[in-house]
Image (tube, grey):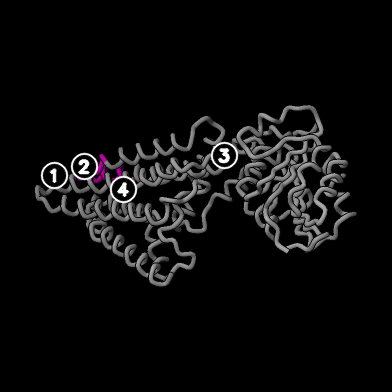
Amino acid sequence: MAANPAMILIIITKGSGEILPETVVAGVPLLRRIVMAASRAGCQDILVVDPGPPGLARLLEGTRAVLLPPWELANHARSRRVLVLTSDLLPQPWQLKRLSEMPLRSGTMHVPTSGIAAVETVDPQGLLSSIGRSIDGASVFSELEHGYQRAGAFMGGGCWIRVSNREDLPKAERWLLRGLIKDTEGFMSRHFERKVSLAITRWLVSTAITPNQMTAVSVAIGLLGALLFLSSTPSYELGGALLFLLHSILDGCDGEIARLRYLESRLGGILDFWGDNLVHSAVFICMGLGWQIAVQAPFPLVLAFSAVVGTLLSAGFVYRQTMHEKASEGPLFTSVTKSEKPSRLSTLAEALTRRDFIYLVVVLSAWGKARWFLALAAIGAPLFFLMLLWISHRERVHA
């Protein structure tokens, strides 16, 4: 049977080890990070079992977690699916969601690695009472082994990360950072930009800078780069293109910081989305003005107008179609279409939204030919908008 993702139990193991619930991992205390991962996975009842004196409540402020002593566990028996997790195991939300939803027969449990188990029980109160009597993690899992049959093979430590000592922290941070890379990244974004942005994020995440502040920095750098395109001098154009590229790299940092710290917000997603389109529009406008000044003719302004209008129409359409009513957890912008089964045309549209085009701007600018990119954008941006309209029409017809 499949269970609802209703509960996760985090067993706090007290001791004199190097790693405590308060230990910061990528800018967030370990215990809070586990709780937030469970929340993102859809767990409604998150119980943090602490047999020691009070002191962890501040780590859980603003979360769904309930801090309670072991003997009160049985009062929270609301689900037949119980996830038991020790506080030194660092999960990703998708891992917990999979354990919450996987089919299990009553009286069985699945153990993907040591320190975590998904248990399906017909007697939640009895199970929680048993856990409450077993104060530390080792005793809890020993009790589970005696009372429940394993379902599925022991998976080993593979994609699970344990934070047992200080030497494990860099490995855990690298693992969390790798989890931020999207499957939809463009080639250059995946192999260059994302590596640079993750290195920057790894440093920034331990500072007080917020995702929205990082968005503002990125947009400011992009607008500064746009101004350099007012000159047709190759060195200025190349400087503008490189700042445009830097904007693109830093633009990845705001989302990375937000996801690492669990600070995603709808406002942040909107600022990020429209900030990008503001920079792109400013680049087109300045390219057109710079070209117009050089040739003393009006046609570059017509090209800039076409590129900007196509860009803003596409952005407005995507925002209304896919982002207007979307919840704030996770990235606000993930796709240009609503379809879960993309067609070849929508796949092409997705590919065209990737930022690898910025490298073409850099190459052309190095030759003093940035205006060629404006000419391409003047044609391509309106065509892209028409493509989105056609994709939306086809999705409605086949709905």
Amino acid identity at mark 1: Ile
Residue 293 numbered tag: 1
Which residue has dot 3 on it?
261
CB contact under 8 Å: marks 2 and 1: yes
Q: Image quarter for residue 317?
A: bottom left
Amino acid identity at mark 4: His
In the rendered image, the quadrant that contains the N terminus is bottom right
How many angstroms separate mark 1 from mark 4 (CA)?
Answer: 20 Å
- Binning the other alpha carbons within 10 Å of mark 1 as few (below 14), some (14 to 19) or many (20 upward) gives some
How many angstroms separate mark 3 from mark 2 (CA)?
Answer: 39 Å
Q: Which residue lies furthest to the bottom in this view?
A: 398
Is disc 3 placed on a helix, strand or loop?
helix
- Binning the other alpha carbons within 10 Å of mark 2 as few (below 14), some (14 to 19) or many (20 upward) gives many
Vertical order, 59 against 379 (above or below): above
Is disc 2 placed on a helix, strand or loop?
loop
Which residue has dot 2 on it?
230
